[in-house]
């Protein structure tokens, strides 16, 4: 027997900048011309964002001789599939995108996840940059480098880590976002404050109105604060083993509600109910003081999040958390608030108390 060792060790600097502000979209082409990350750029978008923004960006890239092509998918989660991924890759090939080019994903989290994955596997990986146009994608999917498509019945089941080379978040693009989508993103914004930053929570309490009106300054400061908070967590835990788990605050119950409700709850709104359940639970056990619990819930009220009762069977909700549990070898691990801006990961939560907290929250959330 002979044994050959293949020695491979990787140490790479994958740092990148996220530019946040009003009017960023109009500066992308000039900035890429001045500070290139590749020779040319293939624009990937969905039909809605194509019409609103990406078509114009493509025009600006063509004008500067920087456009490698343009691919549009249908708006919606259905585009995060292997079938659509294959179509995107084939179109990239047909448009002669090569290894020196960069995929520029312009759109929400769907286009970002699909585009990141396509860039990560096309010709074994080409660079990737992002122009997130939903609040959710600006504050969440633009940080961390997770990319994926869904398999039948399994969300995000197939994907890879591929960090973007650059991100441009234009807060003015949020003005065209449907209210439903905006609120979904706001729930994630509130989540960051509640898990990691009391000062940011205080800022949101004071500036809820300006943020809801999408005023330039409030929106810019908020998106930048969220990216920075998520970056802080991700930097400590790029591959998601420990600390990154706190980003799942409200998501265990939230995902269960998304799965079983026929109300058309957005992801963020479902997470907002999940966060309310956790604050109530923490209040019951004395982990969270009554005044912090009140502030926690008032912050959700300020953004009109998860305020109406949901007529759902509590045992069905709890049963739907089983997928989360299975992933952790039968233990239900929950992120529980211990103060405003602080949470702990617990796997010893009393199920009767949890059941009571969920039941009470669904019946009387706000
Ligand atoms: N990679 C990550 O770390 C990460 C994190 C969170 C969520 N995600 C993924 O993100 C996806 C959800 O993202 P999303 O909420 O952005 O959804 P989305 O991409 O489907 O966008 C929502 C809708 O808004 C439209 N839209 C986008 N920008 C617009 C604008 N500026 N004006 C008007 N309409 C606009 C889109 O066409 C779409 O119809 C999910 O698939 C989720 O799994 C990924
Ligand atoms: Zn989320």
Image: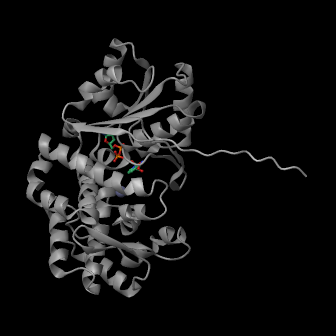
Q: Quadrant of ligand 2?
A: bottom left
Q: How is the model colour-coded? A: one colour
| Up/down of 147 relative to 288, above or below | above
Residue 211 appears in the rendering = yes
The residue located at (73%, 45%) in the rendering is 6
Q: Along the line of sight, which residue is nearer the eye, 315 or 350? A: 350
Q: Is residue 102 above or below residue 256?
A: above
Residue 171 picture location, percent across and down: 21, 39
Q: Where does the image place residue 230, in percent across and percent down from the top left?
A: 33, 54
Q: Which quarter of the figure has residue 46?
A: top left
Q: Residue furthest right?
A: 1
Q: Is residue 251 above or below residue 16?
A: below
Residue 259 in sight: no
Would you place residue 361 above or below residue 267 in this image? below
* Residue 236, picture quadrant: bottom left
Q: How many marks?
A: 0
Q: Nearer the viewer, residue 102 or 12?
A: 12
Q: x, y (%) of residue 99?
A: 55, 25
Residue at 30% across, 57% down: 268
Left or right of 321 on screen, residue 160 = right
Residue sitting at x 24%, y 51%: 225
Could you tell me which quadrant the C terminus lies in? Answer: bottom left
Spot occupied by residue 202 in the image (x, y as percentages of width and height): 13, 62
């Amino acid at each position: 027997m002979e044994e050959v060792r293949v020695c491979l060790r990787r140490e790479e600097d994958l740092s990148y900048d996220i530019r946040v502000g009003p009017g960023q979209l109009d500066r992308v082409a000039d900035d890429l011309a001045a500070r290139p990350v590749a020779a040319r750029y293939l624009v990937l978008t969905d039909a809605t964002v194509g019409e609103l923004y990406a078509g114009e960006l493509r025009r600006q890239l063509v004008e500067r001789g920087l456009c490698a092509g343009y691919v549009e998918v249908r708006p919606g989660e259905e585009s995060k599939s292997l079938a659509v991924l294959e179509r995107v890759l084939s179109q990239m090939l047909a448009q002669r995108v090569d290894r020196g080019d960069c995929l520029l994903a312009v759109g929400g989290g769907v286009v970002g996840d699909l585009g990141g994955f396509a860039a990560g596997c096309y010709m074994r990986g080409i660079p990737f940059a992002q122009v997130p146009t939903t609040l959710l994608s600006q504050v969440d999917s633009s940080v961390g480098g997770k990319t994926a498509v869904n398999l039948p019945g399994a969300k995000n089941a197939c994907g890879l880590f591929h960090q973007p080379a650059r991100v441009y978040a234009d807060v003015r693009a949020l003005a065209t976002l449907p209210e439903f989508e905006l609120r979904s993103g706001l729930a994630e914004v509130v989540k960051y404050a509640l898990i990691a930053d009391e000062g940011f929570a205080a800022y949101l309490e004071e500036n809820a109105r300006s943020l809801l009106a999408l005023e330039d300054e409030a929106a810019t400061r908020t998106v930048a604060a969220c990216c920075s908070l998520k970056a802080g967590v991700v930097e400590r835990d790029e591959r998601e083993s420990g600390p990154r788990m706190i980003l799942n605050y409200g998501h265990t119950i939230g995902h269960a509600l998304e799965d079983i409700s026929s109300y058309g709850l957005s992801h963020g709104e479902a997470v907002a109910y999940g966060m309310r359940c956790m604050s109530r639970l923490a209040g019951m056990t004395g982990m969270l003081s009554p005044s912090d619990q009140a502030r926690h819930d008032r912050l959700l009220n300020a953004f009109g999040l998860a305020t109406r009762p949901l007529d759902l069977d509590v045992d069905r909700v709890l049963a739907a958390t089983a997928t989360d549990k299975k992933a952790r070898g039968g233990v239900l691990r929950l992120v529980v608030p211990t103060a405003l801006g602080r949470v702990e990961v617990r796997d010893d939560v009393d199920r009767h108390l949890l059941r009571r907290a969920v039941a009470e929250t669904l019946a009387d959330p706000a």
